[in-house]
């Protein structure tokens, strides 16, 4: 068994070296658990140093925010594959595919220049810049299988310090600044199990910093959205088929001039290799024979692991036009049923993508939807979090503070509620007062309208009475003849306020009747007689129109009375006009005879008869 194990460890530089935890290492873990918890990424020789440089932030939360639009980049030394991935519900759509060949003038070790080169290439192709995620090649990270003896019954996250200790003991470099993540290889931890199987992965600090700097140059953000493995995309896409298949399955994910080969058991990735065989730079041809040989080497390396199951099925990810020859060659090499796996319904490609582009993009897109497919693989930006052993003490302290806050806060809340009630009462009272004021103002306005209408309607003129009164002042024919009479009224309702307030004021009506009379006279002197009669009524304002001596009278009259009321004179005579109109004539007593003096009209009439 040891010889077989040694043989498996020597198969290729990408083979996973299985490790077993001894009782000595378990005791060392128990003695140094506190140190491992405080510094989960620190080696034993640098336990007091910071695990991650300050310039790189590592989020230990398994659940993190995922952008709806991302750039997924498979970055190699000489080229880069960039996918513009858009999330739609529980799936993704590959909007665009870019295969970029690095110019010789770009130093592959200079992150700033590499990032600027990718950004410029995307801009020249009208590609938008979004948050960046990376799909690392197998040789970028160090993977090791770990069997933890005595870890049965532990929760998954409680294994973090144990994994850190085991990985740091077998790495050729200190873990300062490196990112560590791990995945369980068992579907569940049994309390009576002798050990717990895990797979740990470490991304060296130099590569981690390089990817962070590239992401910063491309998107302007210090941190990438995620850093995973290219092989994990194949794991996510084949997990369901692995669960439905007895035994182990082998999967092949093809990239540009490299590929990832994984072995799954019950939906878990048990073994992974990276090989320098893939599709050519034109995305057309694959050396199917060499890739099938690498698949057989992977099968041989996997069989060297203790308790390894027999591979019963093989799958090749991609389009039939590209990978059909690979499927045939792998089936002949492994002598197991081999199928081509296309993109699931949750992965959509833009119509303009060629079969070669879709084949290369498929495992990277699988990395983008691994959580939707029920897989939690490696993420060197959001690794699994180590438990905090001081959490209980902090929780008790926080509970005490919370109790104090609850007491003080309860009193404050009670007083605040009382204050709110008083404020509500004030608000209700103010609202009632405003409503009452509005109703009072509305009623006052309605009353003002009513008073205005009533006083306006009270303005009347008794036209017949005025006509009769004016006609009584006109001398009888033929001395004068009233042949034109007009009348009109001007009325208004007037409000007189009381002081400066509207309320308490009084309403009154004002009116004025205007009359116009005209007609011929026998002699011009009769016009003056007519004017005197109208003035003596004491009812009208009299204004003569036209020059004196005019054989026609034209008089404007104004009156403020609805009906003329004239006091009867002490002596009056009545002129009986031929037309039957009686006109009272004011008689003046002659001082010498004590007889009524003759009116001007009578004198004029007698003069006419004498002639």
Image (cartoon, rainbow, N blue to C red):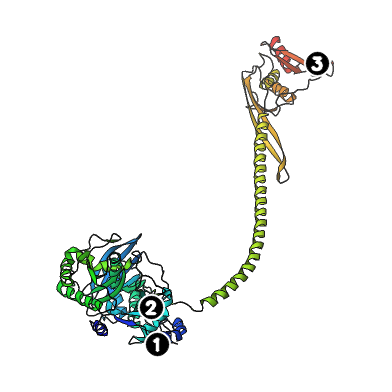
CA distance separating discs 2 and 3:
157 Å
**Is 459 positioned to the left or the right of 285 in the image?**
right
**Is 479 positioned to the left or the right of 82 in the image?**
right
Determine which quarter of the picture holds residue 222.
bottom left
Residue at the spot x=62%, y=71% of the render?
404
Residue at the spot x=70%, y=34% of the render?
508
CA distance separating discs 1 and 2:
16 Å
Residue 611 visible in the snapshot: no
The residue furthest bottom is 45
Asked whether disc 3 touches disc 1, contact meaning CB atoms under 8 Å apart, the reply is: no
Between residue 217 and residue 58, name the one nearer to us: 58
From the image, which quarter does the N terminus lie in? bottom left
Residue at the spot x=65%, y=62% of the render?
414
**SS of the residue at dot 1?**
helix
Q: Residue beneath label 1, please? A: 24
Q: Residue 195: where, in percent of width, then height?
A: 37, 78
Mark toward the viewer: 1 or 2: 2
**SS of the residue at dot 2?**
loop
Q: Residue 117: where, in percent of width, then height?
A: 28, 75
Badge number at residue 596: 3
Determine which quarter of the picture holds residue 40.
bottom left
CA distance separating discs 3 and 1:
161 Å
Residue 47 visible in the snapshot: yes
Alpha-carbon neighbours of circle 2 within 10 Å: few (<14), some, or many (≥20)?
Answer: few
Query: From what the image shows, is residue 459 above or below residue 110?
Result: above
**Is 35 positioned to the left or the right of 324 in the image?**
right
């Amino acid at each position: 068994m040891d010889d077989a194990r040694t043989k498996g460890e020597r198969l290729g530089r990408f083979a996973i070296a299985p490790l077993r935890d001894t009782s000595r290492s378990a005791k060392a873990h128990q003695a140094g658990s506190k140190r491992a918890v405080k510094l989960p990424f620190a080696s034993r020789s640098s336990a007091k140093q910071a695990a991650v440089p300050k310039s790189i932030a590592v989020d230990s939360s398994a659940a993190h925010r995922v952008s709806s639009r991302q750039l997924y980049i498979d970055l190699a030394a000489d080229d880069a594959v960039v996918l513009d991935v858009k999330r739609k519900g529980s799936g993704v759509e590959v909007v665009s595919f870019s295969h970029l060949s690095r110019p010789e003038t770009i130093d592959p070790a200079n992150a700033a220049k590499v990032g600027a080169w990718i950004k410029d290439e995307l801009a020249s192709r009208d590609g938008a810049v979004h948050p960046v995620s990376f799909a690392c090649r197998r040789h970028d990270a160090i993977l090791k299988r770990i069997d933890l003896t005595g870890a049965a019954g532990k929760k998954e996250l409680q294994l973090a310090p144990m994994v850190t200790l085991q990985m740091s003991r077998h790495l050729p470099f200190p873990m300062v600044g490196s990112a560590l993540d791990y995945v369980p290889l068992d579907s569940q931890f049994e309390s009576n199990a002798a050990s717990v199987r895990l797979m740990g992965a470490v991304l060296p600090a130099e590569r981690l910093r390089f990817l962070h700097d590239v992401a910063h140059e491309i998107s302007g953000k210090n941190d990438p959205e995620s850093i995973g493995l290219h092989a994990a995309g194949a794991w996510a896409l084949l997990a369901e088929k692995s669960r439905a298949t007895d035994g182990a399955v082998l999967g092949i994910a093809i990239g540009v001039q490299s590929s990832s080969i994984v072995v799954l058991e019950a939906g878990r990735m048990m073994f992974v290799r990276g090989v320098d065989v893939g599709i050519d730079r034109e995305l057309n041809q694959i050396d199917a024979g060499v890739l099938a040989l690498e698949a057989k080497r992977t099968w041989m390396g996997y069989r060297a692991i203790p308790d390894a199951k027999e591979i019963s099925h093989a799958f090749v990810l991609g389009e039939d036009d590209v990978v059909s020859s690979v499927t045939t060659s792998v089936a002949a090499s492994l002598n197991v049923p081999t199928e081509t796996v296309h993109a699931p319904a949750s992965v959509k490609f833009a119509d303009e993508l060629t079969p070669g582009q879709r084949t290369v993009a498929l495992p990277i897109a699988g990395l983008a939807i691994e959580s939707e497919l029920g897989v939690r693989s490696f993420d060197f930006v959001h690794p699994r979090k180590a438990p905090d052993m001081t959490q209980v003490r902090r929780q008790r302290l926080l509970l005490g503070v919370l109790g104090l806050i609850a007491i003080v806060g309860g009193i404050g809340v009670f007083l605040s509620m009382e204050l709110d009630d008083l404020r509500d009462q004030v608000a209700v009272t103010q609202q009632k007062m405003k409503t009452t004021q509005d109703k009072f103002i509305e009623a006052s306005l309605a009353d003002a309208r009513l008073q205005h209408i009533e006083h306006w309607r009270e303005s009347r003129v008794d036209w017949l009475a005025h006509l009769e009164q004016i006609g009584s002042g006109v001398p009888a024919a033929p001395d004068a003849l009233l042949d034109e009479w007009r009348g009109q009224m001007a009325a208004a309702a007037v409000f007189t306020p009381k002081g400066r307030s509207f309320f308490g004021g009084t309403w009154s009506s004002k009116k004025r009747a205007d009359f116009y009379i005209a007609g011929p006279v026998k002699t011009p002197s009769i016009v003056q007689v007519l004017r005197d009669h109208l003035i003596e009524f004491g009812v009208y304002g009299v204004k003569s129109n036209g020059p004196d001596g005019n054989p026609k009278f034209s008089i404007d009259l104004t009156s403020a009375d609805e009906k003329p009321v004239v006091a009867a004179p002490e002596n009056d005579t009545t002129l009986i006009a031929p037309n039957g109109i009686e006109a009272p004539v004011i008689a003046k007593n002659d001082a010498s005879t004590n007889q009524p003096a003759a009116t001007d009209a009578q004198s004029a009439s007698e003069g006419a008869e004498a002639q």
